[in-house]
Image (cartoon, grey):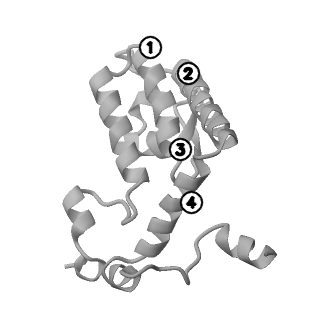
Amino acid sequence: DSARIGRDMTVNFNRKGELGGVISGLYMFANAGIQGQARMAQALAHRRVWQAVGYLAAASVLSTLYSILAGGEDESGVPNYMKVPHWERDKNLIFMMQDGTYIKVPLPYGFSPFAVIGSRAISVAMGHEKPGKAAGAVINSVIQAFNPLGEESSMLMDLVPSAIRPA
């Protein structure tokens, strides 16, 4: 039982399903991505995981608030935090320093949408981001987090099999 539980804690590469070989042949790491999403769905069935997700969103609100207030701003009044590329803000907790540099703490895979909700909510509440743009960022974060084929620059590239992507 211990060996089975240990093996099933993450990705079990022996478990593939009927089309697993075909999908893995077309898209690298697709099996791991699909199983990772299944594990995420199983985890979200538990109350304690939802508590942790709530704490993550709250931590994101606090780190964003701190970064906006303590990170300084440029001559036009735009906080330095808002100049950090959105892909870094959406995948990490950012802590701005007064000189405009920052420390980033990577978010756990699959849980970034919950942090994006928190950070975008506070940036909208403080008037540094428009609600529509924030909503789009949250939706994009959910799509990227639950895409078992990985992240690409465009949705079209997600459909292109791994073997021909370099071309």
Q: Residue at x 34, y 79 (%)?
A: 23
Give the mark nearer the N terminus: 4 vs 3.
4
Nearest the viewer among 38 and 84 is 38
> Is the residue marked by circle 2 packed among few (<14), some (14-19), or many (20+) residues within 10 Å?
some
Q: Which numbered dot is residue 126?
A: 1
Please state which amino acid type lies under the numbered disc 4: Arg
User: Residue at 39% of width from left, 77% of height from top?
Assistant: 28
Name the spot of residue 42 as percent of width and height, x first.
Answer: 57, 54
* Residue 75 drawn at (x, y percent): 38, 17
Upstream in sequence: badge 1 or badge 3: 3
Q: Name the residue carrying label 2.
A: 65
Hey, which quadrant is residue 73 in on the image? top left
**Image depth: mark 2 or mark 4 in front:** 4
Closer to the observer: label 4 or label 1?
4
Closer to the chain start, of discs 2 and 3, is: 2
User: Which amino acid type is shown beneath numbered disc 3?
Assistant: Asn
Q: CA distance from mark 2 to mark 3?
A: 14 Å
Residue 92: assigned label: 3
